[in-house]
Image: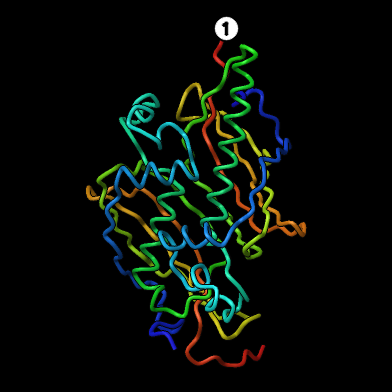
């Protein structure tokens, strides 16, 4: 049994995960594969778009957060994936050299009716840079196995 | 891109399709989502997914790639006809992303987008906001992913 199960998450609890350094090379590599727009491919493209230089694709910031989530707790949890993402807000650009941290707040926990061996834990992740600016907010439920599955009797 | 004024609610565009290989699924997962069902065929076969599946972030990032490729082809065609090309601004985000079916090795996902709403920006003169519903459908015709996103789009200059 993994160390962390559904029972370990309490509504309202707050945890910090990260930090994670973002480099220019990885911003460009992600953009070349998935979001080849000029502001994600080089400083010149970012300046031409009025953004002051290279910025990361918002999808890259999501993927980086996913890695922070896996390293932060999912690797040790009974993770069963996720049904989706309620909302993502891209609030500020992520730039080369940024150190990102994420504040994880548990918004809701509930046992799955259709699959009582697991529960859904809805998290808010607020991703900040080293200046304390929130660059992205992401709200998503994760499916996490239960330690003691019980019959649901309603 | 077309200018904001030329965007019609209800317009649906097929962006393209992509077949996911085991190698690219594992490459993405090693960097961004290293969970056993994205990385390890044997562990994935034992999981509830029954085999290796792409990270949801991988399957949705591929939507963005095909969206950009489609726009860049359309913009090149407009320039070839000496037509003006509107600038697409940054996106404030998205909502209601649903990973409805796992994307397995060898699955071919057809990506599409449909305009669901448009409005003039209150905060940024010269720009509008378009809201689009984006989908990925597998080779069996099953909806595999869906989300609703918003982006700034340049308005047609006056005169």
Q: Residue drawn 73% across and 37% down?
A: B10
Q: Residue drawn 61% across and 11% down?
A: B82
Instruction: Look at the image and tell me in which quarter the N terminus of chain A lies.
Output: bottom left
Residue B69 point in image, percent of width and height: 58, 36
Q: Residue drawn 62% across and 24% down?
A: B2
Instruction: Look at the image and tell me in which quarter the C terminus of chain A lies.
Output: bottom right
Q: Is residue B100 left or right of residue A9?
A: right
Q: Is residue B40 left or right of residue A100?
A: right
Which residue is denoted by mark 1 in the rendering?
B159
Based on the displayed image, in which of its 4 quarters is residue B73 positioned?
A: top right
Q: Nearer the viewer, residue A99 or A149?
A: A99
The chain holding disc 1 is: B
Q: Is residue A79 left or right of residue B143?
A: left
* Extreme-right residue of the structure: B141
Q: Secondary structure at mark 1?
A: loop
Where A151 falls versus B38 (above or below)?
A: below
Q: Residue drawn 51% across and 82% down?
A: A145
* Extreme-front residue of the structure: B23
Query: Badge 1 local density, few (<14 within 10 Å), some, or many (20+)?
Result: few
Residue B109 point in image, percent of width and height: 67, 53
Where A139 falls versus A36 (above or below)?
A: below
Residue B116 point in image, percent of width and height: 67, 40
Q: Nearer the viewer, residue A126 or B25?
A: B25
Based on the displayed image, in which of its 4 quarters is residue B81 positioned?
A: top right
From this viewpoint, is residue B159 visible?
Answer: yes
* Extreme-top residue of the structure: B159
Residue A114 point in image, percent of width and height: 66, 80
Q: Nearer the viewer, residue A41 or A99?
A: A41
From this viewpoint, is residue A85 visible?
Answer: no
């Amino acid at each position: 049994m993994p160390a962390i199960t559904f029972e370990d998450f309490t509504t309202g609890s707050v945890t910090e995960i990260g930090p994670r350094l973002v480099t220019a090379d990885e911003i460009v590599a992600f953009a070349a594969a998935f979001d080849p727009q000029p502001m994600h491919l080089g400083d010149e493209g970012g300046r031409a778009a009025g953004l002051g230089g290279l910025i990361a694709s918002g999808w890259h910031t999501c993927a980086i957060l996913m890695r922070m989530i896996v390293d932060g707790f999912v690797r040790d949890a009974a993770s069963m994936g996720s049904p989706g993402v309620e909302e993502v807000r891209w609030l500020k650009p992520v730039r080369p050299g940024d150190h990102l941290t994420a504040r994880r707040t548990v918004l809701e926990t509930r046992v799955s009716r259709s699959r009582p061996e697991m529960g859904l834990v809805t998290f808010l992740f607020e991703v900040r840079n080293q200046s304390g600016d929130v660059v992205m907010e992401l709200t998503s439920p994760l499916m996490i196995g239960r330690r003691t599955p019980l019959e649901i009797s309603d | 891109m077309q200018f904001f004024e030329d965007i019609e609610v209800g317009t649906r565009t097929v962006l393209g399709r992509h077949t996911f290989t085991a190698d690219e699924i594992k490459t993405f997962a090693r960097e961004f989502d290293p969970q056993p069902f994205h990385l390890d065929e044997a562990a994935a076969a034992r999981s509830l997914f029954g085999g290796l599946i792409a990270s949801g972030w991988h399957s949705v990032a591929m939507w963005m790639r095909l969206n950009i490729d489609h726009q860049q082809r359309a913009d090149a065609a407009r320039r070839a006809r000496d037509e003006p090309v509107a600038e697409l601004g940054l996106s404030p985000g998205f909502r209601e992303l649903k990973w409805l079916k796992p994307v397995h090795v060898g699955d071919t996902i057809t990506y599409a987008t449909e305009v669901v709403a448009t409005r003039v920006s209150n905060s940024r003169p010269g720009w509008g906001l378009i809201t689009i519903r984006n989908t990925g459908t597998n080779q069996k015709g099953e909806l595999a992913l869906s989300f609703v996103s918003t982006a700034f789009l340049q308005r047609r200059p006056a005169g």
